[in-house]
Amino acid sequence: MPLLEVNNLKLHFITRQGPAQAVDGVSFKIEENETFGLIGESGCGKTTTALGIIRLIKSPGRIVEGSIYFDNRDIVPLSEEEMRLLRGQEIAIVRQEAQNALNPVMNIGKQIIEVILQHENVSRETAWARARNQLDLVGINGNRVKSYPHEFSGGMKQRAMVAIATACNPKFLILDEPTTGLDVIVQRQLLALINNLKKELNLTSILISHDLSVVAETCDKVAVMYAGKIVEQGDTVSMYQNPLHPYSQALIGAFPHLKGEKKKLKSIPGAPPRLIMPPEGCRFEPRCEHAMEKCKTIDPAVIEKDGHRVACHLID
Ligand SMILES: Nc1ncnc2c1ncn2[C@@H]1O[C@H](COP(=O)(O)OP(=O)(O)O)[C@@H](O)[C@H]1O
Ligand SMILES: [Mg+2]
């Protein structure tokens, strides 16, 4: 039984020009203890997918279709009240640009105990002790519990965000571009931390990144998103060695080898389509070197090939 199962999730931003189909029929499953990577160019819907799962999408965004089974329960129909219980306790997120999400006028410990006290009936004393432990857990000396965010480096702020997110031992952690903006050494340290936490806290997670090396080192499976859809997904090694979709090939085809040099996503000529009234066929067609006539009009269905789930007319 997967811990998370997303089925045909559609999440649109309702604008005056029409719905922007930021997430449009996305499906995937994540088994317990797995780390699931989500990659794709900026603006393809990765963050929106993540925020949808933890139900933090702000208006005018809304889930218009689909289900999100977490621990066997569809969380799409849950009320905000019910969601609040799950958030932090069961599902947590380290948001994109998390470092800026820290409250600048509150010490780190206080920001950790707030989460604990919100979910658990423990004394303040216990909560403070746990806050110190949390800091130790993420590699910050527990004595820094009264420090303010501005006293921390970028890497430490990111660790502090991880400490806050994991304060109530969630089962599921979403990491949205956790290493972006950090220098390479600090990135490595953060990745090592994430890999350790995965084991120690028995975490299942989604890792969003535009950095292929980060995904290769951390994720069991990878999904490639393009213009609101997952165009291909499969086991990380197989996805890197044998990408089937032309978009995956363009993005990761040039990746040297799994433990190779650092490599960013390759840039591809052209730009992603508008998400308001997108092309009716394959959304990648305008940029695809292999496009055929039917790609213009028929949206390719997802099929299984070589253990991947892929949506492309070249393969179906
Ligand atoms: N509040 C909003 N109103 C309209 N469109 C939005 C809003 N927020 C995000 N979008 C659109 O949703 C798309 C996906 O954005 P996002 O999920 O942030 O992408 P990614 O994380 O992959 O860079 C973008 O094209 C963006 O323009
Ligand atoms: Mg994003």
Image (tube, rainbow, N blue to C red):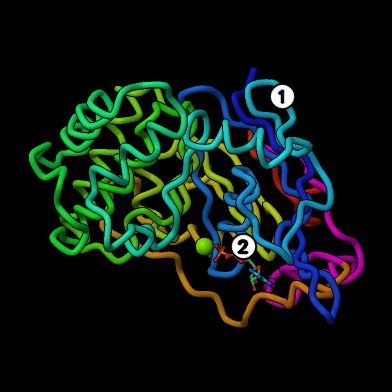
Residue 57: give x, y in percent of width and height: 64, 56
The residue under the point 27% across, 55% down is: 106
How crowded is the residue under tag 1: few (<14 C-alpha within 10 Å), some, or many (20+)? some
The residue under the point 63% across, 61% down is: 45
The residue under the point 88% across, 69% down is: 280
Q: Is residue 304 visible?
A: no
Image side of residue 102 versus residue 219, left or right: left
Choose top left, top right, bottom left or bottom right for residue 245.
Answer: bottom right
How crowded is the residue under tag 2: few (<14 C-alpha within 10 Å), some, or many (20+)? many
- Relative vertical location of residue 203 with respect to residue 221 in this rendering, above or below: above
Residue 203: give x, y in percent of width and height: 42, 27
- Relative vertical location of residue 249 with respect to residue 128 in this rendering, above or below: below
* Element marked by disc 1: strand
Which residue type does callout 2 highlight?
Answer: Tyr
In terms of depth relative to the viewer, which is nearer, 180 or 57? 57
Q: Alpha carbon of mark 1 to alpha carbon of mark 2: how far?
A: 33 Å
Image side of residue 116 versus residue 39, left or right: left
Q: Which residue has dot 1 on it?
A: 73
Q: Which residue has dot 2 on it?
A: 247
Q: Can residue 290 be found in the magenta stretch?
A: yes
